[in-house]
Image (cartoon, rainbow, N blue to C red):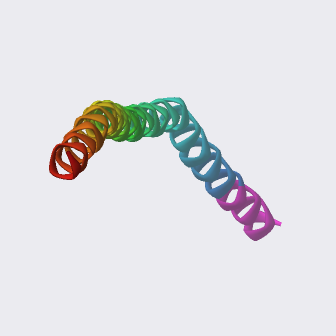
Amino acid sequence: MNKNIEQVIEIEKQAQALSESALREAEKLPAQAQDEAQTLLEQTRTDADREIKQILDNSGAEQESERILSDARQKAEENKTLAAQNMQQAISFVIEQVIGRSQ
């Protein structure tokens, strides 16, 4: 009978040790979860900052492309207008030369 009591006491000690160990682990969980959440938050912010920078960089490139394209269209239009004026002058010159030679 004495042996049975010793076994029960030993089992209770083991149960108590397991309970205390589980309690210590449980007490660590909130701090661990907080650390993991902080790490995740920092990583998310870093990723978001990187994505924002990339979007802004691309946006700047698109704006620069649009500006260059707009400038090129404007120059092309100016050259077209100038060519039309020069064509009219060239036609007038040729007509004057032809008329002048035939007289």
- 31 or 52, which is in the foreground? 52
- 49 or 22, which is in the foreground? 49
Instruction: Tell me the residue at 35%/33% (across/down).
Output: 77
SS majority, magenta: helix
- 9 or 18, which is in the foreground? 18
Q: Which residues are magenta?
A: 1-11
Q: Quadrant of the C terminus?
A: top left
For residue 8: magenta?
yes
Rendering coords of residue 18 (x, y %) = 62, 52
Q: Residue furthest bottom?
A: 3
Seen in the image, is 93 located left or right of residue 58? left
Q: Quadrant of the N terminus?
A: bottom right
Seen in the image, is 96 located left or right of residue 6? left
Rendering coords of residue 27 (x, y %) = 53, 32
The answer to which quarter of the image holds residue 59 is top left
Instruction: Tell me the residue at 54%/37% (across/down).
Output: 29
Seen in the image, is 35 located left or right of residue 74? right
Instruction: Tell me the residue at 52%/36% (across/down).
Output: 33
- 72 or 38, which is in the foreground? 72
Rendering coords of residue 37 (x, y %) = 49, 34
Instruction: Tell me the residue at 36%/36% (across/down).
Output: 73
